[in-house]
């Protein structure tokens, strides 16, 4: 009897968030900011950025990848981190919010995160 191997996508890795800050903060010209990132077990989305513009301080929370739904496994923690870092960048502009979520900001940040991530890993096979 032949046993078929599962093609299930593995859960995302769990990179060191301090290492991601050290890599991306200077690239994003946020060197004068204090950025803290941490994993959270109970978060309503994969990531959340809280930005204090006047203090130049940001908290990036990433939903613990061990708790992601299988439908989310195609994403990566680093890409989610870049998405949230994009909110820090745009937060500096103090854009007006339109309701709970500014859809234009989300679209910009999502495209931005995908482009940065793809650029970094473009040379990988």
Image (tube, rainbow, N blue to C red):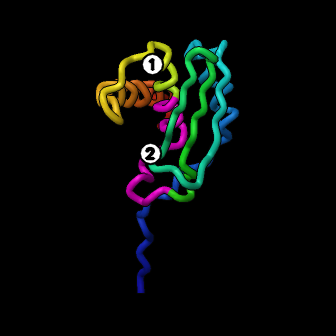
Q: Quadrant of the N terminus?
A: bottom left
Residue hosting label 1: 90
Chain-order first, disc 1 or disc 2: 2
What residue sits 45% from the left and 53% below the top? Answer: 73
Query: Nearer the viewer's eye, disc 1 or disc 2?
Result: 1
Does the stretch in magenta take in 71? yes
What residue sits 42% from the left and 49% below the top? Answer: 74
Dominant SS in magenta: helix
The correct choice, above or below, for 10 with respect to 102 in the image is below
User: Which type of secondary structure does the marked residue at label 1 adopt?
Assistant: helix
Inspect this view and state whether residue 81 appears.
Answer: yes
Residue hosting label 2: 75
Boundaries of the magenta span: 68-84
Q: Position of residue 34 (x, y in %)?
A: 67, 22
Mark 2 surroundings within 10 Å by alpha-carbon count, few (fewer than 14), some (14 through 19), many (20 or more):
some
* Cα–Cα span, label 1 and label 2: 22 Å
User: Which type of secondary structure does the marked residue at label 2 adopt?
Assistant: loop
Q: Nearer the viewer, residue 30 or 23?
A: 30
Q: Position of residue 50 (x, y in %)?
A: 54, 31
């Amino acid at each position: 009897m032949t046993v078929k191997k599962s093609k299930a996508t593995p859960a995302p890795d769990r990179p060191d968030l301090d290492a991601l800050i050290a890599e991306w903060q200077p690239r994003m010209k946020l060197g004068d900011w204090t950025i803290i990132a941490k994993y959270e077990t109970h978060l309503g989305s994969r990531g959340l950025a809280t930005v204090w513009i006047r203090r130049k301080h940001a908290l990036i929370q990433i939903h613990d990848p061990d708790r992601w739904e299988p439908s989310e496994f195609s994403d990566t923690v680093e890409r989610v981190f870049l998405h949230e870092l994009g909110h820090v960048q745009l937060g500096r502009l103090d854009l007006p919010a339109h309701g709970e979520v500014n859809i234009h900001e989300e679209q910009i940040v999502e495209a931005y995160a995908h482009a940065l991530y793809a650029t970094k890993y473009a040379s990988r096979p």
